[in-house]
Amino acid sequence: MPPFSLVTPTSVEEAVAELRTVAPGEVAVLAGGTDLSFDLDRAGPSLRRVLSLRRLPWRTLDWNGPVLTVGSTLPLRSLEEDPGISRRHPGLYQAIRAVGGVPLRHRATLGGNLGRASPASDLLPVLLVLDAEVDLVGPAGSRSVGVDRFLLGPRRTVLAHDELIRSVRFPEPRPSAYLWQRVRPANDISQIAVAAAFSPSERRWRLAVGGIPPRATRLPDAEQRLASSVAPTDPELRPMAEEASRQLPIAGDRRRASEEYRRHLVGVLLSRAVRAAAAHLSEGAR
Amino acid sequence: MTHRPLSIAVNGTARSLDDVPDSERLLDTIRWRLGLKGTKEGCRSGECGACTVLVDGVSTLSCLTLSREVDGTSLTTVEGVADDPVGKEVAEAFARAGAVQCGYCTPGFVMALVGLLKERGRSATVEELLADLGGNLCRCTGYLSIARAVALLSRESP
Amino acid sequence: MSTFRPRPDASPKLAGSAVYGMDLELPGMLWAALVPSPTAHGRLRAVDLAPARALPGVVAVGAADVASLLSGAHGDAERPVFPSETVVFRHQPVAAVAAPTLERAREAARAVRVDVESLPVVSDLEDLFPDWPGPEAEGSPHIAAHVRAHSGDVEAVFRSAETVVRETYRTASVHQVAIEPHACLAMVDGGLWRVRSSTQTPFGLREDIASLLGVPEEKVVVEGTWVGGGFGGKNAALIEPYALLLAKASGRPVKLSLTYREEFLLGRTTLPSVVRMETAVTNGTIVARRVRLLLDVGTSLPGRDFATGYSIGFLLGPYRTPAFEVEGYAVMTNKPAFGPHRAPFAPQCVFALESHLDHVAREVGLDGVAFRASHLWQEGTTTPMGQTVGPFGLATALERARATAARWRAEKGPDAGVGVAVGFWSTGTGAGGEARLRLSPTELTVVQGEREIGSGSVLAGVAAVVARATGLPRERVTVEYEDTAHAPFDSGVFGSRTTAALGRAAEEAVGSLLEELRRRTNRSGPVRLSVRNGEIVVTAAAGERTIRDLLSDSERRAGGLVAVGKHYGKGGEIDETKVDVGTFYPYTDFTGAAHVAEVAVDRETGTVRVTRYAAFHDIGTVIDGATAPAQVEGGVVMGLGTALTEEAIWSEDGRLLNAGLLDYRLPTLGSVPPIEVAFVEGFPGAGPFGAKGLGEPPIIPVAAAVALAVRDATGAHITELPLSSERVARALKLL
C-alpha cells in the first residue's frame, strides 16, 4: 500500500477545502472503506491523500413527514435497524440486507455506494426506483441531483472533484421490492438484481436493474408496459418482462453469468418484484 | 509524516502506539503491533470474516479498516472474550456444540456473534442470528455445529 | 448434547492462543514475497533481480542462485525450485525476495524484471483432444500418463447386448479453500534446514524438501503448527523451499505466507475432466462397460500417473461387471499442478458414474436405485481390477438410504426431488506410522508427529483409541506433538488414515505397554488400566497395583514408562494380467457411503436449493461419537459446493478468472440444509477396533445425489458439474 496520509476533517468546510488542495487523481474519499480498501492496495504512488468523512456530522437519519433523509456516512446497519425502513421502504430494507455480512454493513454507507458507483452495488437499483435525490455539498454551496442523473457509468458520477455527498433523500414511502439472483444467498455479488416500486403520488411503476455493467439503470420502456395498474396481472407482466429482457443493457462477464441468462432472469425477477411490491401495497391498504 | 500516537483501549487496557502509518490496516496493527494473533488473517478483502473484531462493541472487519480510523475507540479481540460475560457464553456454546474444528474461522465467528448478541439483545431468535452470520465462511464444519452453538445461546437466554 | 465432551483443542482455539502457520513470528525475521510469471507459458529470457536487490534490506533468489545456496547439492531435476528456461503456468514463481517488512518485500517482487517470450498456451484439455486421443497421443508432450486395462472382449459384448448407452460427462476444477492460506517460517542453522509450517504431513514435507533441495532428510527438520484446514492442499511442499532458500541467502529467519489470491493461483488442486461412459445391458443386467477419462493434470510431475491410475477405479466401482475396458489419460495444460482435494477426484467420478447408471436404468425401464443395488459389491466380491472386497457395509447403507428416500418422496412438494447415490472409498491404512506412549502415575501421553488439522483425527480419534484400548477415561489420555527430529515417524494426516493407521500404531503401543505391565505385576491374564483415588492403576483378575509402584527410578525421572508401537499396513493387490498400459493403484480397506438429497428447483430461474440431506456411512466402528458425525456434516457441505456453486474458471490464456472468495463460491451458512447422519457398524476395517476412515467419504456421493435429485424434480439430465442455476436453466430449456 502506498504511504498516503489520512486526513480527518471535522467540518464540511474543512473537508471541501482539503479536496481543493490536491489534484483529482491524488485523493480518495473514505466513507466506510468496504469498497475503497480494495483499491488502496493497488493504488499507485499518485495517491497522496485519503480524506476520511468519519468526523463529519452525517451519520443521521431523519423522517420529515413522508420524506426520509439519510446522512451519507450513516452505516447501512443503522439504516437497516430503523423500524421505519422495513415498513415504509421494504425494497430498500431488502437491498441493504443483501450487502455483505453484518460486520461489513457496520461500515458500509449509502454515500459510499453512490460515490464509488460500483456496477455490482446492491443498493443502486432501489435508489433508482425510489427516486432518491443525492444532496451534494461543494465550494459553491449545495445542490441536489436525482440518482438517475447522478450515476454516469461504472465508477463514474457527476460528483465534482471538490464535492461531497452529504445525504440521500427519499421523497415518499413506496411499496417496493428488491430481488437478486446469486450463486449463494449470503456474502455474494448478484448475477443480476432488480427493484420495483409503485409511486402512489404518480400512480406509476418504477423498475430498475443492477448488478451488471455498465451501471444500474431504470427500464422506462418496461415501466410503460405496466401503465398505472396497481396490481398487474400475469398477462400484463409478460410484455413487461419481455421488454425488460430486450432492453437490458449489458456487457458479458463470464465469471458471474452469461448475457443470455441475465436477459432471462431480468424478466422473471422483475415480474416477481412487481408482485411482491403490489402485495405490500394491498397489505398497506388493509 | 509525524503523528501523534494511536490510542486504543485493547481488551480493556489503554494502549498507545507510535509510528502507525496512515495506510496500516487494523488487522495488521492487531496481529503484528499488538501481537494478538487470535484475530485471523484469511482473505484480507472482507470476504471471509476471519478477522472480525469489535470496535466500541460493534463487529467490524479489521482487514477493511484503517487503524487510524479507530483512533480513540475501544477494541475487543477474541483474546478479550473470556473477560466479557456474553463472550464467555459464546465461547462455551462453541465448545459444547463442537463448533470448533480447525479453528481458523472460529475467532471471527465468535466475535461476529458476540457483536450480534450485544446489538440485538438476547431476544434475537436463532433464525435472525443465523441470517446475520452469513458474512463468515467456514470450510470444516458445514456450519451445522455453529448453528447448534447459536441455538444453545438462544435457548439459554431468559 | 449433555454428554458432549468438548474437544481438547477447542479451548486454545477459542482463546486465540493457538499458533497457526500464519501467526509465526521470530525477532529479526524477514518477510518473503514471490515473483510471478506474467504468462502461462513462455521462454524465460531474463529474470533481473538487480532492481529488487537495490532496495534497502532486500534479499532475492532466483534460478541462478540455487546451486551456490545448496553448496553443489542438486535437487530433483524434474522439479527445479525456480524454472530456468520455461515457465509453464501463470504466476509460477520465477524468483523470491525477502525484506524486513512485507510492504518492502512486495515492492521488491514488483521491481524484479521478468522478460518472457510467450509461447502458445494450452488451457482447455478439449482444445488438445476434442475427440478421444488417438495414435497421435503416443509421445505427445501433453500426455503425462496413460493407463489402460480390460477384462473380456467388450466390443463383442457390446455388439450382442440388448442396449448400449453412451454418454459424456464434464467436471469442473475445484479448490480446497482451507481458510488459512499456506504459511511457513524457515531458518537455516547449524547445517540444518528448519521450517515451521502449517502442514498436514510433517514427515512428507521433510521428504519433499529433501528431494527438492537435494539434501539428506536428516538435515531437514519440520515442525508443524496448528493447521487452519488442509483438505489435501497442505500435504506436500508448496512454499517451504522458497522460504528456506531465502533463509539460507539472508542468514535470517524468513516468513512466507500466501495471499488468498495466491492461494488460488498457486494451489495444486482438482482440475477439469471429461468422462465417457458406455454401458451394455441385457435382461436388466450390466454385461459390459467401457469407461474413459481425460483428466487435466496441469503441470503435474510428482505422482502424475497416480491421478489417473487411482481415481479411474471410482468410475468402475462399486459395481460388478463381467467385461470392462478402462482407459485414462492425464493431460498436461498450462495450469498449476493437479493436487489432492478431499477424496481426490472421487466426487467427480461418482457424479458421472451414478448419473450414468441411473440414466442407463431409465433407458431400459428400470428403477435407478434398484438397478444399482442389484450390481453392488458385497463382501467377497472380486472387483474389476481383481481385488477381493473385505467386510463392506455399503449395501446396508444403501438399504437405509432407500428407506429414507421413499419416506421423503412420499412427503415432497411439486418442485422437489429426491436423489440417492453411493460411493466407495479406500481407507489409507497402507500408509504406515508409529506412536510412542508415556505412562506416568497419573497420565498416559501419546507422543506422535502429527498436528491436528481440524478433523479431530489426532486429538480426539487417536486419544479415543488409546483410552478404549487401555480402559482409561478419556481425560487421562493426552496427545503430544513433536517435530520430525524427535517424533516417531508417521505418514501424514491424509487419505482418511489417521485414526485408523496412526490409531493402530497407538493400539500396538498400548499392547506392548500392557504386556510390560502384565509382566511387572506377574499376572497371567489380560490387564487393563483404570483410575483409583486419582492414581492410574493396573487392574487384573487378581487385584490392582498403582503405576507409581511399578515405575523404576529412571522411568519416574523420564516422566513415565515408555512403549512404542508401529503399524505398517498391507496395501492391496490388483490383478496385473488385466493391465495393458501404465500403473493401476490398489485400494486398501473398502468403505463407502449412501446419501440422500432432497432439492427444490426454481423452475423459472433454475436455482437448486438442497432442502434436506441424509448420509449413511460404513464406518466399521465409531471411535469418537462427537467428531465422527461432525466429519460427515462438513464433508457433505463441501460436496454441496462441488455440486452446485464451486468452479475455478480458466481463460484461454491460462488466467484463473475467479481467484478470490467472492467469485469462487463455497457454501455459506444460509445455503446449508439439515443433515441426518447415521453410521453402519459391524463391517470391520483394518483400523483399531475395526474402524474405517471417515475424513474423505462424506464428500464423495454428494454431487451425484444432488444431480439425481434435480433429475427427479425436473426430469433434467445434467452431465456437467457444477449444477449452476444457469446450467439447470438451460437444461430446463429456459434459455
Image: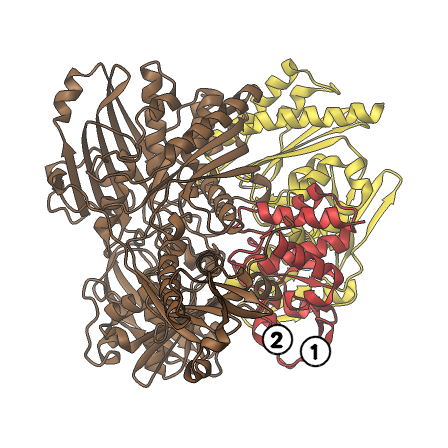
Q: Which chain is yellow?
A: A
Q: Secondary structure at mark 2?
A: loop
Q: Up-down: is C113 above or below C385?
A: below
Numbered badge on residue B34: 2
Counting from the top left corner in percent of width and height, residue C723 is at 44, 33
Q: The disc numbered 2 marks a residue on which chain?
A: B
Among the 4 quarters of the image, the one containing residue C697: top left
- Compared across the picture, whether C38 is left or right of C332 comes to right
Question: Which residue type carries mark 2?
Answer: Leu
Can you name the residue that lies furthest to the bottom here? Answer: C190
Q: Which chain is brown?
A: C
Q: Which chain is red?
A: B
Give whichever of C385, C235 is nearer the camera: C385
Question: Which residue type carries mark 1?
Answer: Arg
Q: Up-down: is C282 above or below C691?
A: above
Numbered badge on residue B15: 1
Counting from the top left corner in percent of width and height, residue C687 is at 36, 51
Numbered badge on residue B47: none
* Tags 1 and 2 touching, CB below 8 Å: yes
Q: Secondary structure at mark 1?
A: strand
